[in-house]
């Protein structure tokens, strides 16, 4: 819901302080002028009064939604109202599936480009390919109109069994090609990529916690174990969380029978405890969990449980700090309310929820404050009061009250020799060049069927790199400075990674990207000790 209505502060004041304001306003008038005969349904009466008497026309639905949003904002940062229009956008990532046509897309040059059709989905079955441009949907042009990603998704998603016609531009096809697609259930995935990082060392990158997450992680572990995995890197960086039960089930894969994973408790909700079972696939091998400031909620539950039981190493930077649990109330009109009903606590008894007493603006700008305080560069910039100290079974000190503090701190990388690389990345030049290169050379690149084949077989040649340098120069970024070897290595690596992503999605991207990632390489180093 947009908050740029000039009368919004007045509405919130009326609704949230109805008893006081209206009592003062109406109490000085004759009793016959006061429409409120009792204190029953005061909020409902205020909304009716606004609807019937407000100076401008405003629907009751709009008033109700503004009132609910205003009320929830005063509670905590994670109690939210979701309108019917936004409901599927908010819920689909948690469900592990949605109804649609089954394409991964990006908007490039104001045009919707298919990155990859979902394997086995309705689009792939009809012959839609990576690199195709969707120009029209049901006869209406969507190219060149500054369409947003959300608007594209609204047009392409729809109930299973319904049909949508897309007009595709394909290189060499000579005009638009129409496809009438019958929408179907499209799976979404929490595991971005799984591969063997080194002999004996597996890697799983997990992006969220949905209904399908535990099954995906379980299957990934089975695959890695069959490939000879003895040690594991679980990458939870940027994982914003999701379902509590999914976090419990994933943590259960790494902890022994009876070990406490998490407990929750609230004013109106009794303490609920979750313990590990004997069903975990990886309860013994060495484990490193990678985290950062984007690791939140369910991802912090897993990290906290592993850390509190001294089960593995937490590596990276301090996590986000979301320790509140929400329940969802669905309304008949398709909207929903997610209300914070309890806090969760790690096995040592710490709540890692960061403070929100200074309001939403400060809470949501936490990353900026971490950056300005130097926390992202120096671990000793982080201060925890003694009252938030806890001890693990082996005597290690851990902290509550503001995220999970890693066992091994990895600062953001700052290196003056990377100036050329940083400029190329920040201006989007590497991404755009890789996109254009893949688009021009897709036919020649199609013989790479897997990420492993691409990683071993594709090389950024000096000819390709010279072409990029010329491209960047024309865009105002000149290759200059001393000690450019590291910058060149990083640019070439990212060019290859983005070409791999455009061709093969995540399996063609992360194994290459990780090769220059300081946190990833430190995790490999930790797991390689004692060989």
Image (spheres, rainbow, N blue to C red):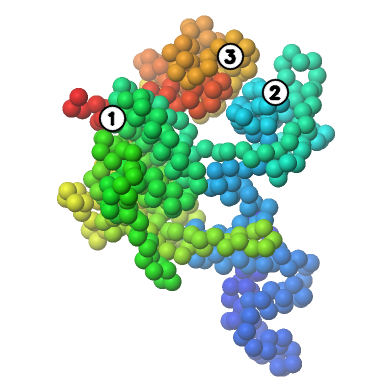
In the image: residue 93, left or right of residue 159: left
**10 Å crowding of disc 1: few (<14), some (14-19), many (20+):** some
Disc number placed over residue 127 in the picture, else none: 2
Disc number placed over residue 168 in the picture, else none: none
The one nearer the camera, 361 or 45, is 45
In the image: residue 49, left or right of residue 489: right
- Counting from the top left corner in percent of width and height, residue 365 is at 46, 50
Q: Could you tell which of marks 1 and 2 lies nearer the N-terminus?
A: 2
**Element at label 1:** loop
Residue marked by disc 1: 230
Determine which quarter of the picture holds residue 133.
top right
Residue at the far bottom in the pictured view: 31
Q: Could you tell which of marks 3 and 1 lies nearer the N-terminus?
A: 1
**CA gap, disc 3 and disc 2:** 15 Å
Q: Which quarter of the figure is the N terminus placed in?
A: bottom right
**10 Å crowding of disc 2: few (<14), some (14-19), many (20+):** few
**CA gap, disc 1 and disc 2:** 41 Å
The one nearer the camera, 153 or 122, is 122
Q: Which quarter of the figure is the C terminus placed in?
A: top left
Task: Write the residue at 63% across / 49% down.
Answer: 88
**Element at label 3:** loop
In the image: residue 504, left or right of residue 62: left
Task: Write the residue at 59% across / 28% down.
Answer: 119
Residue marked by disc 3: 446
């Amino acid at each position: 819901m947009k908050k740029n209505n000039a009368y919004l502060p007045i509405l919130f004041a009326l609704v949230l302080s109805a008893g006081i304001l209206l009592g003062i306003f109406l109490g000085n008038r004759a009793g016959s002028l006061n429409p409120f005969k009792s204190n029953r349904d005061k909020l409902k009466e205020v909304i009716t009064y606004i609807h019937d008497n407000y100076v401008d026309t405003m629907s009751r639905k709009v008033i109700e939604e503004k009132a609910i949003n205003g009320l929830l904002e005063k509670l905590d940062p994670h109690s939210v109202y979701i309108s019917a229009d936004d409901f599927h956008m908010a819920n689909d990532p948690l469900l592990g599936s949605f109804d649609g046509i089954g394409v991964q897309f990006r908007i490039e040059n104001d045009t919707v480009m298919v990155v990859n059709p979902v394997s086995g989905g309705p689009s792939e079955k009809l012959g839609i390919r990576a690199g195709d441009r969707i120009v029209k949907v049901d006869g209406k042009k969507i190219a060149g109109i500054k369409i947003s990603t959300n608007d594209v998704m609204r047009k392409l998603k729809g109930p299973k069994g319904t049909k949508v016609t897309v007009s595709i531009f394909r290189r060499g096809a000579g005009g638009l090609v129409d496809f009438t697609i019958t929408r179907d259930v499209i799976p979404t995935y929490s595991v971005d990529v799984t591969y063997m990082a080194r002999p004996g060392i597996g890697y799983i990158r997990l992006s969220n916690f949905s209904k399908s997450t535990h099954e995906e992680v379980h299957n990934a572990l089975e695959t890695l174990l069959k490939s000879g995995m003895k040690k594991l890197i679980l990458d939870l960086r940027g994982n914003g969380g999701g379902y509590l039960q999914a976090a419990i089930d994933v943590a259960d894969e790494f902890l022994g029978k009876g070990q406490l994973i998490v407990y929750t408790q609230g004013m109106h909700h009794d303490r609920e405890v979750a313990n590990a079972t004997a069903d975990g696939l990886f309860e013994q091998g060495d484990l490193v969990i990678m985290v950062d400031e984007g690791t939140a909620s369910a991802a912090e539950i897993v990290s906290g449980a592993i850390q509190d039981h001294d089960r593995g190493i937490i590596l990276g930077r301090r996590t986000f700090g979301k320790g509140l649990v929400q329940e969802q109330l669905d309304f008949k009109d398709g909207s929903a309310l997610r209300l914070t009903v309890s806090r969760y606590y790690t096995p040592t008894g710490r709540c890692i929820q960061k403070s929100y007493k200074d309001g939403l603006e400060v809470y949501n700008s936490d990353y900026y404050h971490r950056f300005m305080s130097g926390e992202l560069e120096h671990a000793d910039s982080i201060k925890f009061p003694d009252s938030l100290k806890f001890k693990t079974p082996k005597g290690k000190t851990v902290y509550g009250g503001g995220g999970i503090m890693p066992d091994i701190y990895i600062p953001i990388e700052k290196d003056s020799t990377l100036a050329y690389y940083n400029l190329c990345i920040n201006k989007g030049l590497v991404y755009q060049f890789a996109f254009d290169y893949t688009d021009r050379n897709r036919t020649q690149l199609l013989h790479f069927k897997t990420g492993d084949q691409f990683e071993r077989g594709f090389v950024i040649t000096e000819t390709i790199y010279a072409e990029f340098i010329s491209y960047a120069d024309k865009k105002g970024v000149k290759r200059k400075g001393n000690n450019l070897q590291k910058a060149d290595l990083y640019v070439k690596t990212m060019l290859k990674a983005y070409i791999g992503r455009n061709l093969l999605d995540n399996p063609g991207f992360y194994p290459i990207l990780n090769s220059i990632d300081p946190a990833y390489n430190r995790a490999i180093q930790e797991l390689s000790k004692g060989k």
